[in-house]
Amino acid sequence: QSVLTQPPSVSGAPGQRVTISCTGSSSNIGAGYDVHWYQQLPGTAPKLLIYGNSNRPSGVPDRFSGSKSGTSASLAITGLQAEDEADYYCQSYDSSLTLVFGGGTKLTVL
Amino acid sequence: QLQLQESGPGLVKPSETLSLTCTVSGGSISSSSYYWGWIRQPPGKGLEWIGSIYYSGSTYYNPSLKSRVTISVDTSKNQFSLKLSSVTAADTAVYYCGGQSTSGVGWWFDPWGQGTLVTVSS
């Protein structure tokens, strides 16, 4: 059972917009700690997609955006492309002095 | 460009100690900008943070693994290492090392090593 809760799967057609939620608690996201997002393509290491709730590292397309409110955060992907099919993980910091991840969400492009 | 590479045995026997090293290239492990962390991913499952170290040797560990984990740093070799004792099949996973940055209200991992699969089996 992960500290941060994500839907196991989401799907969308090419060109559509999808969102992935990440729900935490008052000891992590709700305590004001930032949320970060990673994309893991099949057979590869995770790659940083969003840091500090809504910041994109250099090279990440602006189709990817992040937001945070209360005890939850969201990753939005617009203009869905076939190459976006991957696993997505949120991550934050918990007051128990632990770096915590969500369980991951598998994005399927229909 | 900072790059990380894990190395170590791919097979460890139950009850023994898993040992991995992460070599940092393209930058100094003594940079004040980074902590250095270990993360693992059991086959078909999600990510789990193991622990992290600063170049000064300051460490912090996942409480669920703390009793079995030791992370150390060798600044002369630009490397940091992971030791996980008394392993069982549940420790079978891909182990990643990562550079860990902060904004002051959180930590994130970038870059990541490519990962190395460690299987615990007799």
Image: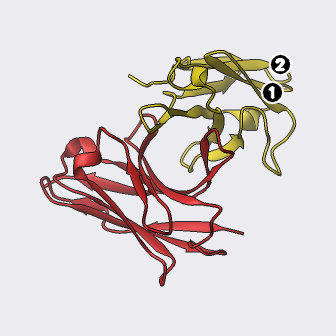
Q: Which residue is mark 2?
A: A16
A62 versus B69 height, above or below: above
Marks 1 and 2 on same chain = yes
Asked if marks 1 and 2 touch (Cβ < 8 Å), the reply is: yes
**Image-based side of B25 in relation to A74, left or right:** left
Please state, as top left, top right, bottom left or bottom right, where the N terminus of chain A lies in the image: top left
Q: Colour of chain B?
A: red
Residue drawn at x 72%, y 19% is A19
Q: Which chain is yellow?
A: A
Question: Which one is nearer the viewer's eye here, B21 or B59?
Answer: B59
Relative image position of residue B4 (x, y in whole percent): 56, 66
Residue drawn at x 57%, y 34% is A91
Question: Which one is nearer the viewer's eye here, B85 or B8?
Answer: B85
Relative image position of residue A15 (x, y in whole percent): 86, 23
Colouring method of the image: by chain
A11 versus B73 height, above or below: above
User: Please, what secondary structure does the residue beneath circle 1 have?
Assistant: loop
Residue type highlighted by circle 2? Gln
Residue type highlighted by circle 1? Leu
**Image quadrant assignment for residue A35:** top right
Numbered tag placed on residue A6 in the rendering? none
Relative image position of residue B28 (x, y in whole percent): 61, 75
Please state, as top left, top right, bottom left or bottom right, where the C terminus of chain A lies in the image: top right
**Image quadrant assignment for residue A55:** top right
Which of the two discs, 1 and 2, labels the residue nearer the N terminus? 2
**Image-based side of B78 in relation to B21, left or right:** right
**Image-based side of A6 in relation to B110, left or right:** left
Q: Which residue is mark 1?
A: A80
Residue drawn at x 14%, y 53% is B14
